[in-house]
Image (spheres, rainbow, N blue to C red):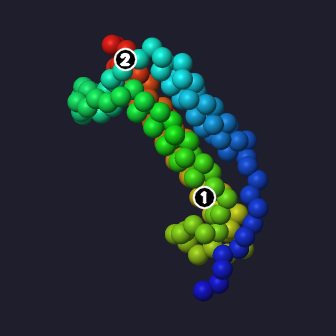
Amino acid sequence: MKPEPRITLTLSPTDKFIELICWLSIINIWILVFVNYPKLPGIIPIHFDLSGKADGFGAKENLFALPVVTTVVAVGLTLLNRFPHRFNHLVTITPDNALRQYTMATRFIRCLKLATVLIFGLVVWGMIRSASGH
């Protein structure tokens, strides 16, 4: 089995925009937690049922777990994106199609990272709103 070609990818403006939104969102999640933390009661909702009603409660310190996990996942996906030649591709990678395949694969990972960050951000926002009585 031949090793897949290694090429250097340059980020397109779209890729740069996705990265920017992702990292700004992570910063905003951290700011949201730090700004609201002092205002929260000692016990906050940490789990919700399918209808959105809180069904699990815990110490407000648990709120910090989500930004930490979000940051770790984003860093992990960023590092993963540096090695597209190690991905499991659906087609055989050749020197002719490597650029296109690697570009599509890394963009997918980048979009997955952004979606994950936005979902975690919505969860943090929902926990804070619920704990604040909204």
Label ID, residue 80: 1
Does 48 sit left or right of 99 as displayed?
A: left
Query: Could you tell whether 58 is left or right of 22 in the image?
Result: left
* Secondary element at image label 2: loop
Secondary structure beneath disc 1? helix
Viewer-closest of 51 and 107: 51
Q: Residue at x 65, y 63 (%)?
A: 83
- Depth check: 33 or 1 in front? 33
| Residue 129 visible in rendering | no
Q: Give the image location of residue 10, x and y in percent.
A: 76, 53
Q: Which mark is residue 90?
A: none
Above-or-below relation of 53 to 109: above
What kind of residue is marked 1? Leu
Residue 123 at x, y percent in the picture: 41, 31
Quarter of the image that includes the N terminus:
bottom right
> What number is the disc on residue 41?
2
Quadrant of the snapshot with the C terminus = top left
Q: Position of residue 12 (x, y in %)?
A: 73, 47
Inter-mark Cα distance, 1 to 2: 38 Å
Mark 2: give few (<14), some (14-19) or many (20+) Cα within 10 Å: few
